[in-house]
Amino acid sequence: METVSDSEKIVFDWIPLERVGPFVFGDLIEKYCDKFKLKQIPEEYNEKVGWQVWRKDSRFSVFSERERIVAVSCSTSCNYRNIDLIGISVKDVISILDTIPDSVEMIHLVEGPQKVYDFDDLELQLWAKNDVVETAICSGPFGEETGPHLKK
């Protein structure tokens, strides 16, 4: 009998500044590694912000700093108030969030150009191709001086 792993049952519901699915911002990453079969991907270490990347498959990535979860990237599902933000127009997301992006930047990737929308108050970054959201990167409220993971 085939069983479904915990990582395949994840519902990626986003509560801004708090969590994405079961991944709570500020929690120790080790708490999730076995349960969700997360493996560190050292070649994707982000030198700019000093984050480690953890992944089981291509559906999501978890980012950690000092062993604490700081962000989650979702590419197949990211539910906000029971609405999946992945696959809908940026215009619809702006309406759902009831806020406008603080910045928009065009990024040129091998797969083609994408626009990156930053919503600073929500710690949300959306990557869109042809104005349709392909990826949501949700972060916790962890500034350089204020993050609970940095306090002793």
Image: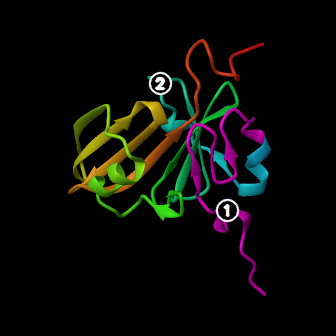
Is 5 situated above or below 142?
below
Residue contact at pointers 2 and 1, CB within 8 angstroms: no
Q: Which of 62 and 45 is in front in this view?
A: 62
Mark nearest the camera among 2 and 1 is 1
Percent x, y of residue 123: 48, 34
* Kind of residue at disc 2: Glu
Q: Which residue is drawn at 67% across and 24% down?
A: 66
Q: Which of 20 and 67 is in front in this view?
A: 20
- In space, the residues marked 2 and 1 are separated at their CA atoms by 27 Å
Residue type indicated by callout 1:
Ser
Residue 5 point in image, percent of width and height: 72, 68
- Say which quarter of the image contains residue 104: top left
Question: Does residue 86 belong to the magenta stretch?
Answer: no
Task: Provide the major secondary structure of the magenta segment.
Answer: loop
Question: In the rendered structure, which disc, 2 or 1, sits on the residue that comes first in sequence?
Answer: 1
Is residue 107 left or right of 73 when viewed as pictured?
Answer: left
Q: What element carries label 2?
A: loop
Which residue is at 34% across, 52% downward? 95
2 part of magenta stretch: yes
Q: Considering the image in quadrants, where does the N terminus appear?
A: bottom right
Instruction: Assign the C terminus to one quadrant of the image.
Output: top right
State how many labels appear. 2
- Image x and y of residue 69, in percent: 65, 36
For label 1, the SS is helix
* Region in magenta: 1-30
Tell me the number on the disc at residue 7: 1
For the point 53% across and 24% down, which residue is it?
Answer: 50
Q: Is residue 10 left or right of residue 59?
A: right
Q: Which of 63 and 144 is in front in this view?
A: 144
Task: Identify residue for label 2.
Answer: 47
Q: Which colour scheme is used?
A: rainbow
